[in-house]
Image (cartoon, rainbow, N blue to C red):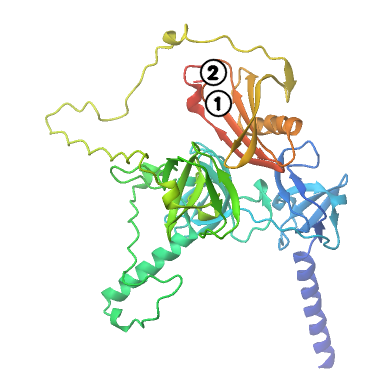
Amino acid sequence: MRKTCTVFTTALCLLFLAATVASAFGEIRYSDRPLNLRASRSAKARWVGSLYPGQKVRIAFMKDGWAAIFEPGETRADESAAVGYSNAKYLVLKPGRVEPESWGELMYTPRKLNIRSGPSVKTARQGVLDAGERVKVDFPDGDWVMVFDPGATIRSEMNARGYCAAKYFEPVKTQAKAASAKNAERAAASGDAGNVVSVPSGKGQVGGSVASAPKPVVTTPKSAQDNDGPLAAAGENPGSSDWGKVVTLQEDINLRKERTSTSPRVRTLRAGDRVRVDYLKNGWYAVFVEDEVLRSENRALGYALRSLVDSEDQPAPVPAPAPAPAQSAGAAATQDGPQTLVIDRTKFTDAKRPDPTPNKTAHGYQYRLLEKSETKKYGETWITLKIFLSTTKLPGADQIKDFCTTMWTDHRRATKNLVVLLYLPGMDTEDLAYGVVSFDDSGLLELWVRKVALFGTDFL
C-alpha cells in the first residue's frame, strides 16, 4: 500500500513539474532603458512598439544577440506569440529604474464589430468584438485604430488583435453611465423605484434628476454593413468628428491639469488656434486637438473655463438639413441605386504645375525637401517638413512610416515635435498633403493618409 502511494505521489509531482515547465518557458527580464521593439532581429527592421525603463517582459528564442519579447504571463512557447524583438543586452535580470508609461485607451463598442487585418473594410476579417466588450485602443491610423486585450501590458503593433473603425467606440465611462441608467429604468418599470435608499448629495452624485437613457443603437442587416459598425439614423453623421464642437479661440488661454484655476498649468493655447471641446462639467471644458478621432477624456490636452472658450463671435451650429420628401410611386426614381460620376481629367491639364525635381534618395525613393519650418501649436514646438516623393507606385502605410521615420531621425530635436507632410507627383504642394506623419522627441505619434488629396492625379 505504501509503495502504491509513493508511486502515485511521484506521478503527481512529475505531472506538476511538466505543467510548470510548459507554462514557464524562457525567462523574465526587465528593460534597463526606453527600448524599441522591432518586427524582426535587426535594428533596421520595422519599428512596432516600445518598452519603458524597468518594464517586465518574458524573453525566449535567443538568436544573434536578439530576443523574442512576450507578455510576462504568456504560456505559449511559440515564437508566433512574440510581440516584437529587442537587443538582449538591454534586458537585465533585475529591475533598476522604473518609469512606467500608460498607453492606450480603455473603450467598448455597443454592438458586434469586425476586427480587420488592416485599416480598411477591404482587408480580411480576423475576429469579432462582442457587444459591450472592452478593449484597449491605440496606434490610430486615419479613421482606424488597433485593438488590444484589456490586460495587455506591452505597447506593440504585434500585440494587437487587429484594426477596428475608431468611430464606433465609446469610453468605458459612458458604458458605466448607460448601465446605471438602464438599471434605474428597470427598477422603475418593476415598481422597485420606491425602495431606493436616498443618500446625501455629494461628489459624483446627481441630485434632483434621473440620468437620461442612452441613445438607441440603430441596427442594420448583416448584408448591409457586415458588422463593421452601425449605420447612422436619418440626419446623423457617424463620422469620427460628430462629438463635441470645434471652436476658434479668440484669446490666449491657459489649460489646466484639473477643472480648477488653482490646478497646475499644462500649456498655453494662442488666439486663432482651433480646438475641439467636450465633457463640460462645473463650467470647464476638456480641450482636445481639432482632429482628435477618439472621444476619450484621457486624450484631452487639458481643461479650460467655458467662459474663455465660448465666444459670442463663434458661428452658430448649422442645423441638420431636413429629410428629403419621399418620392411618389409614379415619380422617376433618379436617386435610386449607385450614382456614377465621370471625371473629365482634361480640365486639370492646364492647372497642373510641374513636379519638383528630386535631389535625394531614402528607402528606394527619390525625394526633395521643399520646406522646413518651426511653429508653436497648442503650446508645443513643431518642426514641419514638406517633402515631395517621386514615385509611380502609391506607397502604403508601412512604406510611409519607414520613410518618415528616417526623416524624423535626420531632423529631430530634443523636446520638439516633428510632422512630415508627403506630396506625390501631380499634387498641388500648397494644398492638403497625401501623408501626414507626426512624431514627438521619443518616436511615432500618428500616421494619416488622405486618399482624397490625390484627386486629379494619376493615382486617383
Residue 117's x, y, as percent?
A: 57, 42
Secondary structure beneath label 2: loop
Question: Could you tell me which residue is drawn at 32 percent across and 56 percent down?
Answer: 216
- Indicate whether 227 appears above or below 24: above
Question: Is disc 1 placed on a helix, strand or loop?
Answer: loop
Q: Is residue 165 visible?
A: no
Ranked by sequence position, the earlier of labels 2 and 1 is 2
Is the residue marked by circle 2 packed among few (<14), some (14-19), or many (20+) residues within 10 Å? many
Question: Image quadrant of residue 413?
Answer: top right
- Residue designated by label 1: 433
Residue 369 versus residue 269: which sits nearer the camera? 269
Q: Is residue 349 above or below residue 223?
A: above
**Mark 2–mark 1 CB contact (< 8 Å):** yes
CA gap, disc 2 and disc 1: 8 Å
Disc 2 residue type (three-letter)? Met
Q: Is residue 107 visible?
A: yes
User: Which residue is the extreme one toward the top?
Assistant: 350
Closer to the camera in the image, 347 or 415? 415
- Left or right: where does residue 383 sit relative to residue 97? left
Task: Give the numbered dot on residue 427.
Answer: 2
Mark 1 Cα shell of 10 Å, populated few (<14), some (14-19), many (≥20): many
Which amino acid type is shown beneath numbered disc 1? Ala
- On the rendered image, what quadrant is the N terminus found in? bottom right
